[in-house]
Amino acid sequence: MMIFGSNPMNHRPNCMVEDSLEFMDLLPFITKSLGPEGLIEELCKWFQLHMDTKKGVMTLEGLRRNVARLGLERLADDELLRMLGEGDLDGDGTLD
């Protein structure tokens, strides 16, 4: 599998347990590959792809609409909610 132009299997983090990775586990590898400015640019693109353009925030519905396009159909709502919850600082159910 290729991610950000490199093969993550060449750099397996020590934190891999039961095939589970968190974003923060991959962040050092992504940052090394893209550089800090490239990482911010990619995160902004990702946010714009998934956000509700009328509300200017990322919602569960927005994520649900896009998971099929990204080949992530197997993600359940509870997983999507967990993703939103990681960045939902004000508790309104959205990432803004």
Image (cartoon, rainbow, N blue to C red):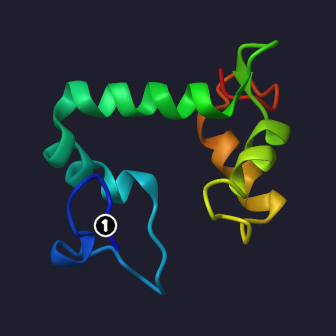
Task: Name the spot of residue 24 as percent of width and height, x first.
Answer: 38, 51
Residue 78 quadrant: bottom right
Task: Name the spot of residue 73 as percent of width and height, x first.
Answer: 73, 66
Residue at 71% from the left image edge and 14% from the top image edge: 56
In the picture of the structure, the residue carrying the numbered disc 1 is 2
Residue at 63% from the left image edge and 64% from the top image edge: 71
Looking at the image, is 91 positioned above or below residue 72?
above
Residue at 67% from the left image edge and 31% from the top image edge: 88
Residue 72 quadrant: bottom right
- Circle 1: element type: loop
In terms of depth relative to the viewer, which is nearer, 71 or 61? 71
Looking at the image, is 72 positioned above or below residue 44?
below
Task: Name the spot of residue 41 as percent of width and height, x first.
Answer: 35, 25
Q: Is residue 63 toward the left or the right of residue 1 in the image? A: right
In terms of depth relative to the viewer, which is nearer, 14 or 49? 49
Residue at 73% from the left image edge and 72% from the top image edge: 74
| Amino acid beneath label 1 | Met
Task: Name the spot of residue 26 as percent of width and height, x first.
Answer: 32, 57
Looking at the image, is 69 positioned above or below residue 8?
above
